[in-house]
Structures are given as C-alpha cells and as structure tokens.
Amino acid sequence: MQKLLQLPVNAVNIVKTVQSQVQGQEEDKSPVLTPDSGQQAWYSALQPDELRHLRSGGTCGGGGGDQEERAPLEEGGGSGGGGFQTQPLRHDDLKEMLDSNKDSLKLEAMKRIVAMIARGKNASDLFPAVVKNVACKNIEVKKLVYVYLVRYAEEQQDLALLSISTFQRGLKDPNQLIRASALRVLSSIRVTIIVPIMMLAIKEAASDMSPYVRKTAAHAIPKLYSLDPEQKDQLIEVIEKLLADKTTLVAGSVVMAFEEVCPERIDLIHKNYRKLCNLLIDVEEWGQVVIINMLTRYARTQFLNPNINESLLEEGGGGEKTFYGSDEDEDEDEEEKEKKVEVAALAKRKPYVMDPDHRLLLRNTKPLLQSRNAAVVMAVAQLYFHLAPKAEVGVIAKALVRLLRSHSEVQFVVLQNVATMTIKRRGMFEPYLKSFYIRSTDPTQIKVLKLEVLTNLANETNISTILREFQTYIKSMDKDFVAATIQAIGRCATNISEVRDTCLNGLVQLLSNRDELVVAESVVVIKKLLQMQPEKHSDIIKHMAKLTDNIQVPMARASILWLIGEYCEHVPKIAPDVLRKMAKSFTNEEDIVKLQIINLSAKLYLTNSKQTKLLTQYVLNLAKYDQNYDIRDRARFIRQLIVPTEKSGALSKYAKKLFLALKPAPVLESPFKDRDHFQLGSLSHLLNAKAGGYQELPDWPEAAPDPSVRNVEVPEWTKCSSREKRKEKKVEKPFYSDSEGESGPTESADSESDSASGSESGSGSEESGSGSESEESEEGSESEEEEEDEEEKDKKKKKKKELKKPVNHFSSPRPLQTIAPSSALKSYELLHRITGEGLQVEYCFSRQPFSPDANMVAVQMQFTNNATSDTKNLHMEDVKLQSGMRVKEFPEIELLPAGETSTAVMGIDFCDSTQAANFQLCTHTKKFFVSIQPPVGELMRPIFLTENEFKKEQGQLMGMNEITEKLTLDAKCRNEHTIVQRVTSAANLSRVPCGSDKEFAGRTVTSGSLVLVTVATKEEGAAQLTVNCEKMVIGTMLVKDILLALTQ
C-alpha cells in the first residue's frame, strides 16, 4: 500500500529533477552547501552512526509516515551502487517543513537547521519560521527550537520579544528540559525592558523542583547582572537561596554566579562553607575548579597563616637577600634589627593550631589531585601552595609532574606554575628532577620553561648533572633554546659560587663556536659573570677583545666594548687598539654599539689620554654629526665633561668618579621571582600582568575571625537526624560520616530537606539581603510537628525571648520559635550580633496601620546591645530604594546602654512589590549595610466584606486575574481553625463571615488593589485554592506562599 502511495510522489520528483537539470536553476541554495560542492549532502559531515539515527527519524512518529512526507523533499542524486544522496534543501523547503502539520517533518527540519548551525552556517533568516514552533507540543521539536533560539535570540531581539509570552509559558512546562531551555532563551534576550520578567523567571526557577532548572537559573544570574547591574541586591538574594542548595549539580554554577556578581559578600559563604567542602568531590569538574578558587580566597580571609612562624623566621634571617646578593643601606640594617625583635617576640607566642575548618578544606581537596581534569589538579595545587603548611605542600608535586605527560598547552601552563613554586619551595620538586629534562620534540616555549625549572632546582649536589644536560642542549639546532641555555648556565654560575669558574671556562669555549648567535649570547653572559671578579679574568677580557673583528651581533659587540672600557686598567695595551678599530667602523655600527664606542673613548681619555686623546676627539666629532639625536646628545655631554674648558661646570672635576665608579655586579634573577603575588593558575599569573576581572588574593588576617559563623547549623543537622530516627524507629547511616567533623545529613533528612528546600524557596521572598529567614507558615507547622519532642524546650525559649529568628537557611526541618498564633508575627534578623560587633537588630511586620502615612507598611525594629560599651546615635543613612518606593525613618535612638533593648517603628512604602529596601544602619562609630524585604503577604491590609460583596467582586476579577491551584491537605490541616490560622499567618487578610467556603479579603497597602482568597475543601483532604487579584504578579506569589503554608 505504501509503495502505491509513494509512486506518484516519486514521479513528481523525477519531473522536478529533469526540469532543474534543463533549466539550470540553482538559485536559493540552502546554506548547508559548501562553497565548492553543489551536490554535497547536508549530512555528509556526519558519522555513519549519526546518519543512521537521523535517517530513522529519531522521533516518536511512525517510520512509514515519515518517509512518505520526506519523499517530495528528497530529490534523487542517482549515485551508483544502490546508495543515494539528498540534494541540498532550499530555505523555502525548510520553511514549508516547519509550517507543516506533521511533527515528523518539523523534527526533520529542525535537525537539519541545527546541523547547519553546528557547521557554522548562518540560519538567522529562518528565525520567524522557527519561533512559531516554540509552542509545538512535540517535546523533541520544542527542545531543538529552544536550541536554535538560544543561538539567535540575541541577534533577533525584536522577533524574540514577540514570543515572550510563549517563553513564559515554557517556564511552567512539565518537562524540566523545556523549563530550563525557556529560561536560557529568556536570559539571552538582551533588552532592558524585560528585566523584571527575567528577574521573576529566575526567582521562580531558583525554587524549581528540578536541580537542572535551578542550575540554569544560576547561569542566568550573571547574564541579567551584566544587562542591568542595578538588580544586584535582588540577585544576591537568589544567589543566597541557591547557595543553600544541597544538590551537586547546582553548587558549581551558583558559586560561579557568586564570583561574577558579588565576590566581596564573603558572609554568604559562612553558613555554606562546610557543605561546599563536603560536596566538592561529587561536583562536576568545572564546578570544582570554580569552587576551589573561591574557597582559596575565602580561606585567606578566615584562617591564620599556617606558616607564620617559619615565614617570620626566614624574613628575620634574610636568606633570600644573601642568596641573590644585594647592597644594604643603614635603613635596611635597622629593619633587620626590628625583624629580629619580632622573631624573638614570636618565640614567646602560643604554638599555631590549625582551625578544623581549614583542615577540612585541605583534607577534602586532596583526593582531587588524582582527577583526570588538568584544571582541577591545577586548582588544588594552587590551593595547597597558598593555604597548606609548608610540610604538606609536597603532595602536589607528583600530581603536577603527572600533568607534564599531557598536551603541550597543558604543559605550558603547569610549567609556568611549577617555575614559580620552585623559587620558594625548591625541595618538593627535587626528587622529580629528571621529569624536567628536555626532549627534542618539545616546543621551544616548553624547553625554555623546563630550563627555568632546572635552573631553579640547581644546587651544590645536582649542579654537575644539570650542567652536563646543558652541554647537550647547546648543540641543539633551535637557536632561541640555545640562547636560553647559555643564560641558564650564567644564572647557575651566579647562584652557586663553587661552579662559577667551570661555567665561565665553558662559556669561553663557546666563543669559538661557528654559530654567531651562540657566541653573542655567551659574550653577554660572560660580561655579567666577569663583573663579579674582573681582576682574576684579564685573560678572558683579552680573548673577548679579539672577537670584535668577527662578531657582528650588536648586543655582543656592545658588551665587549663595555667590558674593555670598564676594566681598561687590566688590558692597558689592547684597549687603545680596540678603540682605533672601532673609530674606523664608527659610521657603519648600530646605535647601541656607537654609544659604547663613545663611552670607551671617554674612559680611555680619562685613564690613558696620551695614546687616545686624538682618537677620542675624532670619535666625538663623528658622533657630533650622527643622524641619531641620542648619539649627538651623548657626544656633546661627554665632550663638556671630560675636556675641560673655561665654560665647563663643576662636574668636570668629578669626571673620573662618574665614569669609572665601581658598579655592582648584575643580579641574574629568575623572571618568575615576583610572580607569586598573583594567584597561581590564574591568567594574570600566566601573563605576569593583572588581567581584567582578576581578584587579588587577600592577605592572611593577623587575628583569626570568629569561627562560630560557620557552625551555626551543626547542632540542627544532628537534631534533625535524631528526630527522624525517633520517628521512623530506624537507624540510618549518615552519607558523610560524623567522624569527618562535618555535619552531613542522614539520608532521610536529606530527602525531606530536599522537598522542604524546594517548597521553602517557592515564594522567592523569604530572604533579606543581609540575613536569612524561613516561611512563617513553616514555623507554625514545624513547631506543631515537633511539639511532642521539643515541648519543654519551646516553653523555656519563649519565656526568654519573644522574637526569635531562624538561623538555618538551607537545612532540613527543625524546631523554630513562634509567637502565639493570635499575634501571627514573625521576627527576621536585620543585623547579627557578630556582624554588628555586639549590636543585634531584629524586625517584624506589626500589621498595624502606620499612622504618619496609611500607604506605608509598619516595620517594628528591636535593637539589643550585647556589647560591653554603650551604643549612641542609632539612625539610618544612605537609603537606596527602587523607583516609587519611600521610607519614613525611625526616630534616632540617642543612647542604648550595654545589655539593654530598645524598640522603634519605621514605615516603608514598598509600592506593592517585594523589592528590598536597602539602607545603612549607623551608630556613632560604625555603619552597617542592611536590607528589609517583605513577604508578599505583608504588602496588604485586611478589609471587611460580606459574602455577597465578596462574590460580586470575585466575579469582576476572573480570567487573567484568577489563579487556581489544587492541593491535598495534611491530616493536621483539615479542620477549619487550622486552615484559617495558616492562611492569615501567610497573608494579612481578614476572614469573610458566614462564607460557604473559607474566604478571605484584603487590599494592597499602596494601590488599594483588591485581593480575594478562597479555600474550598472537599473529601479526603482534597482542596482548591483560588486567588483573585488585580495585580497578577502579587496573585502568583501569594498563591505560592499560601500553598506552602497549607501543605506543610
């Protein structure tokens, strides 16, 4: 039957082929064509397996139907052997396929378009045809459409904006890949007008049940930040929420977002530090790199230097200075004395004890030295180099040597870092000396770096082996490498006095080499070595003077002339003759050589004027008319200085001292000596220059910061685990053992807290910029659930403190303190007592009218002075608000005595949004940046409506203004009293009396927009939540909050 149906189609294809051959029509060819091949199939670049997959359709549609629809579009190429080729499709054909009603055709078209993009072809003109299919119900088509849109959304912004409602619907798609793709496309549209939509989408995605979608939300954060940096405060809140995520898939991405947006907010890492350390081994490789680099900077600010004692002793000894040899002034001697005093004081200090969290980081990163990814190994190596005690750094050497078997690009980066490490920690690479020997197949840049490492590792014991290697390298055909080897020999001779004469003799032998470049480089190095002991080596100076006839390299000729001039008293007979030869060829020399000829003539005039007076005048006259103004200036200057006249100044008396002063021997130092101030493994270290976006590695603190900021959650994890064990009467083994010192959750706690964190983050408004909080309804429900276990503790804590802020931001359920349900108030932390240096500030939304301005939300603040001294002049400054928002500041508190508590009320007009109000809380000495962000339920005030009025208003708020969600109520939440209590705790609404269902009404504080909530209960705990609101954004957020309150 299929053959009968296909016959007319094939006939049409034959007619089409004949027509195209006769008429030669080749216009509108598909971009899948290569420039030089008209008959190349679109899939020619694919492998046979991939081709077979594409031919089979790869779709849920039947194969037969697919072939029938594809037949008209595949024009026979007629190659022999039974094979066939498809002629390239024109764009019109692709558009027809995309407009087809058949999903199989759309899928085929999308595969071909994505293949075009993968091959670098431009498919942007297909954007209108593709974007129409974003609403396609076929999952496979939709995924490919989103792949296309991510590529072209930034270029075709106007067309992408037309489909923005479809992308928003895609954010609620049941398929996690579609939700993630929709967010990726949305964040790729670089138009500021949709920033609020992107922000809302990111907040929703951060609360998604799928870790893949949450990971995509983390990727979208830097995109939005680069588009609109003013959104930083809101993005920090999302980052804070995502940092609390326990999923390994999310960890690396959110830390990357943290590094891009707010790397200075180190306080966000405190409570997540141990979790990140524990998850590190399971995070994907590039996430590991980002997390390790971030934790390196974190550790440098939070822990003490483990090598503080050794480093101070080394500084006191001045070992490095004597090694390189430098002249020291009297001031430096005084500094040395001061350092010795410091070292003496240091000896009286307590011995260093490593912080357990510092040890945790080192222990958890060590296994990653065996990673297959070179970047991970390099990241761990730099962490150990910057953070580990000197005795433990050696473990990284073997891992880095292993990386030298990788590609040349990896070797280059690794050797750059090894070269820096060998300057300070030479000992750890000495056992692997042979690994740095040079192979003939190595590229030049690798050879030079290996030479650098070998030179740094050279000492009295291995120098003979290294010099034998160097002798072999000098025979190489690579001239740059040979020059670098000669310089390395010179550095070895400088650093190790025992082999200085040996090296010098070897270099002198190289002066007879046939290669001019080798001789020239040898001359330059010998010149530097002779400056150390010139009186012993007058024979070498004579030998080098003879080379002026043969060597033509300007730098070498200049070096020889400088040597003869500087030590002319050692060669009094040869020096004038060299000047005579140089004067002959003066006009033909390079500028650098001419300058040295002038210097030589001046020095000989001052020491041997009888023989060289006329020669000097001749050279100066030649220089006077030289084309180079530098040479002319030098000649005038020297003539006035050495040839006294009546016009000569006072300087001519000191000509000898000026020209023949003793000059310090040059210090041959490694070019990597000062690179360690850049973080190893960074681009800045590689370039030896600060690159854009580079963050300086912080200095070690002098005193250790408070370690308690990291362990606030530790007791709660263990409590949670024990409660779960009591409830389930099971003993479950923790995923991370307690002996590790990290508070790892049990499996049961892990699964429960996962669902809790997913639902907890639903409102997108439970965090403030500088603190963390949990949902009010969560508090009520959890305190009920744990009533049996924690009843006595709760009573005691309630007596001690009325307002209690939950500190755990990301862990599993735990006992939270609440006020009596009648008040339904919850406290949030504005300023922690550690951050506030004794000043603790909490706030709550009092739900009372704010008398100075009815359009403002009343915020009650409680100040507690936990410090030993009084706090004065508490007030607000530098208020930063989104457009339309207003603040009525609280009256200044002039004095808050130590141990006392004071209360104040301020008003904030949030303009019916959950945007944070940011300001500085100031005392007479300090300023603290704080932030207040309201839950959406606090943006409204209750109003009284009868049931008839309620129904009437509800009827006018239908369609887009109505949001309905189905839910199942927990057994504890099925009675009417509990439902009313939980709804009113989540939102400041009043109950409609005598309603058939549980109905609530209120208005937003700023605009007075009506908010109506209905909870209709059915059998077996089934219920339906309906919210009618003029403002759709507020309605959407309120549904999530109330849903969370009712289902916990």
Image (tube, grey):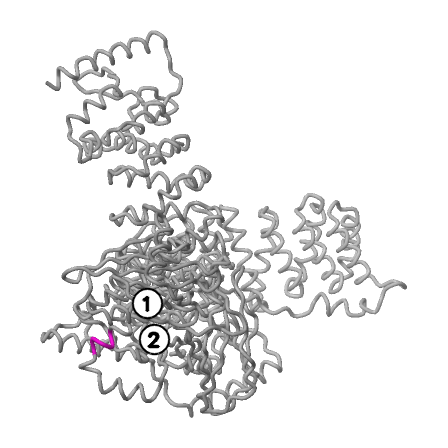
Question: What residue is disc 1 on?
Answer: 991
**Dividing the image into 4 quarters, which one contains the C terminus?**
bottom left
Please name the amino acid that badge 2 sits on. Ala
Which label's residue is closer to the chain start, 1 or 2? 2
Please name the amino acid that badge 1 sits on. Arg
Q: Main secondary structure of the magenta part?
A: helix
Which of 548 and 405 lies nearest the eye of the viewer?
405
Question: What is the crowding at mark 2: few (fewer than 14 residues within 10 Å), some, or many (at least 20)?
Answer: many
Q: Residue 145 carries which label?
A: none
State the residue lying farthest toward the right. Answer: 646
Image point 33% across, 7% down: which residue? Answer: 22
Residue 190 sits above or below residue 263 on the image? above
Question: What is the crowding at mark 1: few (fewer than 14 residues within 10 Å), some, or many (at least 20)?
Answer: many
Query: In the image, is residue 977 part of the stretch drawn in magenta?
Result: no
**Total marks drawn?**
2
Residue 80 sits above or below residue 443 on the image? above
Q: Give the range drawn in magenta.
A: 782-786
Residue 758 position within the rendered picture, expressed as x and y whole percent measured from the top left: 27, 62
Query: In the image, is residue 784 part of the stretch drawn in magenta?
Result: yes
- For the residues labelled 1 and 2, the Cα–Cα distance comes to 15 Å
Image point 62% across, 60% down: which residue? Answer: 563
Question: What residue is disc 2 on?
Answer: 824
Which of 254 and 431 lies nearest the eye of the viewer?
254
State the residue lying farthest toward the top. Answer: 22
Q: Is residue 890 left or right of residue 148?
A: right
